[in-house]
């Protein structure tokens, strides 16, 4: 293909289209990364919740211990209350674990579904961009032929006559 005044325009367009294609793939990958990061964060929050529950349960037990020592002996029985607190925290922790497990499972399923969608979408994007670039190349070739023909016609036209 010969250099004509339109070549830089076509080169710039082709570069812009290829950059758009790359950005589309980057956006797909960023979305996948964010889904995976969110799933990791949800999974990590389970251990934080458990640590918080243990800390709070310990604080409640310490409060009961302080109350018990400040009262006359056998004025109040705190063992049943301690057991109630333990059972309540254990039930809340179990419920939280089940909820988080369900969320992580749903996120993993979403991630798998997104991977499938992203692969299909990337194929469509690539096919579309490839088709556009092929058509673009054909237009560039046609413009080059026209430019050559105009140049040849201009050369044949005798300005001095």
Image (tube, helix red, strand yellow):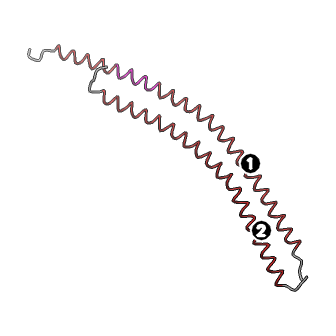
Task: Kindly identify which numbered label has been placed on residue 102.
Answer: 1
40, above or below 140, in the image: below
Image x and y of residue 22, in percent: 47, 36
Residue in the picture at 82% in, 84% down: 70
In the rendered image, the quadrant that contains the C terminus is top left
State the image quarter where residue 16 is shown.
top left
* Disc 2: which residue: 57
Q: Residue furthest left?
A: 160
Image x and y of residue 112, in percent: 66, 38
Q: Which residues are magenta?
A: 131-141
Q: Mark 1 and mark 2 in contact (Cβ < 8 Å)? A: no
Most common SS among magenta residues: helix
Identify which residue, 115 or 148, lies in the foreground. 115
Q: Is residue 134 magenta?
A: yes
Identify which residue, 47 or 26, lies in the foreground. 47
Q: Is residue 1 magenta?
A: no
State the image quarter where residue 149 is shown.
top left
N-terminal of the pair, mark 2 or mark 1, is 2
Image x and y of residue 68, in percent: 84, 80
Asked if residue 131 lies left or right of residue 3, the reply is right
């Amino acid at each position: 293909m010969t250099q004509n005044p339109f070549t830089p325009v076509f080169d710039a367009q082709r570069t812009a289209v290829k950059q758009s294609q790359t950005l589309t793939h980057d956006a797909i990958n960023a979305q996948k990364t964010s889904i995976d990061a969110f799933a990791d964060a949800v999974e990590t929050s389970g251990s934080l919740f458990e640590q918080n529950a243990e800390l709070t349960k310990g604080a409640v037990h310490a409060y009961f211990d302080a109350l018990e020592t400040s009262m006359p002996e056998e004025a109040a029985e705190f063992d049943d209350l301690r057991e109630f607190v333990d059972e309540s925290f254990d039930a809340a922790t179990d419920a939280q674990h089940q909820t988080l497990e369900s969320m992580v499972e749903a996120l993993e399923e979403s991630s798998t579904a997104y991977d499938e969608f992203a692969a299909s979408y990337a194929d469509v994007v690539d096919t579309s961009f490839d088709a556009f670039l092929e058509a673009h190349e054909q237009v560039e070739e046609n413009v080059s032929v026209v430019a050559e023909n105009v140049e040849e016609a201009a050369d044949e036209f005798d300005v001095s006559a």
